[in-house]
């Protein structure tokens, strides 16, 4: 390739975090111009206090995939309206989420699509509460893209989850939803656990327990393979005790390269607004606790594939080709049982409700981009590297010359989730997690450990930094 592996980074691998951030800023600006407060990142929440008191509150999802149009604003609008038209009389749409995937990030195309979706929603008084865009080089035929709109509705149409009992006693119940995809990991393994666990962790990071999930699967493989993924998704939802909502399955050979698939979806949950975890109460001296991840989860696979191509046949690092494939196929690690409990132990959100001040799900952008979202202005999370073990695949990349800074910018580096608590409570939380959950998922070590501290830096200063040394 002509590039030294020590100089390879995510941008050179075809995925630009800078472009992604530009797109996200443009989306926020578009939504703000329309009077919407949605961040345009993953998901959001909507007040459903008006539904309190109903004996039954069935909630479901209706989907529509992209309506082709060269005008991206019109394409977004028409895609949203295509979903609205599928809603039966008497069913009430209450929120919209969108998803847009393509080979790269276009600062005009993606925000334009979101603008169209949001405009359609406003025309019938349904807010856009969030969404996601994905960079997936190699997945699509040249110049092609895919997108969908998920409309959350109230009423009985298809598969639904009844949330009436869940919101009883809540002062101001919020319906929360998160949309995301598994990215280019599907080029290695097509496992719906990745998106279900990923999205559920995202929802859990604000303190909302997942209750239902709707999967979107499209690609250029035999239709039977797509349907098998749906069956697996339904089985996983049953195991987790969440409702599997109506799936969207579409064969799109004109869009996707041969053999390629995208697996995405939307998870929903409910929470009382006063119980949301926002990070606003984090103070100087508080402690971020890391929960271990033994794999790349669902992020950084474009970079990982470039590393593997540059390394070639396994040389050093202790992994065979079979072991490399196995490591890259490990499912996204779930932390929702640690947060909300299982049949054996209560979750930390109930057991330590008053002291869990912030959380972060370590996905795209590594520890920095995710942890700093939960750190108030004027403070900084100073995090030690390698307190928890690096995943075997990351050790392999490091042994073969990959740059640690480039990997830290992109990969989770062995930490899949963080919880920030007051210093005096940290040891108790760590001991509780390790005693009850560390080995409760077969084959996965989810060790908890203190990974840093919250320090004062001053307004306008960085809110995250790695501590000196440790590598």
Image: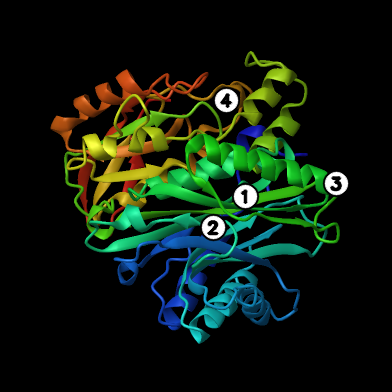
Which numbered marker is on residue 18? Answer: 2
At label 1, counting other C-alpha atoms closer than 10 Å, the crowd grade (few under 14, some 14-19, many 20 or more) is: some
User: In terms of image quadrants, where is residue 251?
Assistant: bottom right
Q: Secondary structure at mark 4?
A: helix
Instruction: Give the residue at x 26% y 51%.
Output: 279
Q: Dividing the image into 4 quarters, which one contains the N terminus? A: top right
Residue found farthest to the front:
55
- Residue ID for mark 1: 11
Query: CA separation, marks 3 and 4?
Result: 38 Å
Going from N to C along the chain, the mark reached first, 1 or 4, is: 1
Q: Is residue 403 visible?
A: yes
Going from N to C along the chain, the mark reached first, 3 or 2, is: 2
Residue found farthest to the bottom:
123
- Marks 1/2 in contact by CB < 8 Å: the verdict is yes
Going from N to C along the chain, the mark reached first, 1 or 2, is: 1
Q: How many marks?
A: 4
Instruction: Give the residue at x 40% y 61%.
Output: 56
Query: CA separation, marks 1 and 4?
Result: 18 Å
Instruction: Give the residue at x 52% y 34%.
Output: 239
Which numbered marker is on residue 222? Answer: 3
At label 4, counting other C-alpha atoms closer than 10 Å, the crowd grade (few under 14, some 14-19, many 20 or more) is: some
Residue found farthest to the top:
318
Residue 124: where, in percent of width, then height? 51, 84
Residue 260: where, in percent of width, then height? 78, 47
């Amino acid at each position: 390739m002509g590039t030294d592996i020590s100089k390879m980074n995510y941008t050179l691998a075809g995925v630009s975090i800078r472009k992604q951030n530009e797109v996200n800023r443009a989306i926020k600006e578009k939504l703000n111009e329309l009077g919407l407060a949605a961040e345009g990142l993953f998901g959001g929440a909507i007040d459903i206090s008006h539904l309190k008191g109903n004996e039954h509150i069935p909630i479901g999802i209706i989907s529509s995939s992209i309506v082709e149009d060269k005008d991206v604003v019109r394409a977004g609008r028409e895609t949203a309206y295509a979903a609205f038209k599928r809603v039966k009389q008497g069913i009430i749409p209450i929120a919209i989420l969108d998803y847009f995937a393509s080979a790269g990030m276009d600062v005009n195309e993606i925000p334009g699509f979101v603008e169209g979706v949001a405009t359609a929603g406003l025309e019938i008084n349904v807010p856009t509460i969030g969404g996601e865009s994905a960079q997936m080089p190699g997945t699509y035929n040249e110049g092609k893209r895919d997108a969908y709109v998920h409309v959350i509705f109230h009423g009985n149409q298809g598969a639904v989850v009844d949330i009436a009992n869940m919101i009883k006693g809540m002062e101001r119940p919020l319906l929360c939803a998160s949309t995301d995809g598994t990215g280019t990991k599907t080029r290695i393994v097509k496992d719906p656990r990745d998106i279900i666990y990923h999205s559920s962790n995202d929802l859990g990071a604000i303190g909302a327990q997942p209750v239902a999930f709707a999967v979107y699967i499209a690609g250029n493989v035999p239709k039977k393979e797509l349907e098998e993924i749906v069956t697996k998704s339904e089985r996983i939802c049953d195991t987790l005790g969440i409702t599997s909502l109506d799936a969207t399955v579409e064969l799109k050979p004109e869009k996707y390269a041969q053999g390629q698939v995208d697996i995405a979806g939307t998870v929903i949950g409910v929470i009382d607004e006063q119980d949301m975890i926002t990070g606003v109460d984090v103070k100087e001296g508080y402690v971020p606790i890391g929960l271990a991840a033994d794999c790349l989860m669902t992020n950084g696979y474009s970079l990982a594939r470039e590393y593997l191509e540059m390394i070639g046949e396994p040389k050093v690092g202790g992994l065979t080709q079979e072991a490399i494939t196995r490591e890259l196929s490990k499912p996204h690690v779930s932390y929702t049982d640690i947060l909300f409990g299982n049949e054996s132990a209560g979750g930390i959100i109930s057991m330590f409700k008053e002291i869990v001040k912030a959380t972060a799900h370590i996905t795209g952008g590594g520890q920095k981009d995710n942890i700093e979202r939960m750190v108030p202005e004027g403070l900084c999370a100073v995090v030690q590297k390698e307190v928890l073990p690096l995943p075997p695949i990351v050790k392999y990349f490091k042994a073969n010359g990959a740059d640690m800074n480039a990997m830290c910018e992109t990969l989770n580096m062995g930490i899949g989730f963080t919880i920030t608590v007051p210093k005096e409570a940290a040891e108790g939380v760590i001991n509780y997690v390790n005693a009850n959950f560390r080995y409760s998922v077969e084959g996965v070590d989810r060790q908890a450990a203190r990974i840093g501290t919250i320090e004062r830096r001053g307004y306008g200063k960085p809110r995250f930094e790695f501590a000196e040394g440790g590598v």
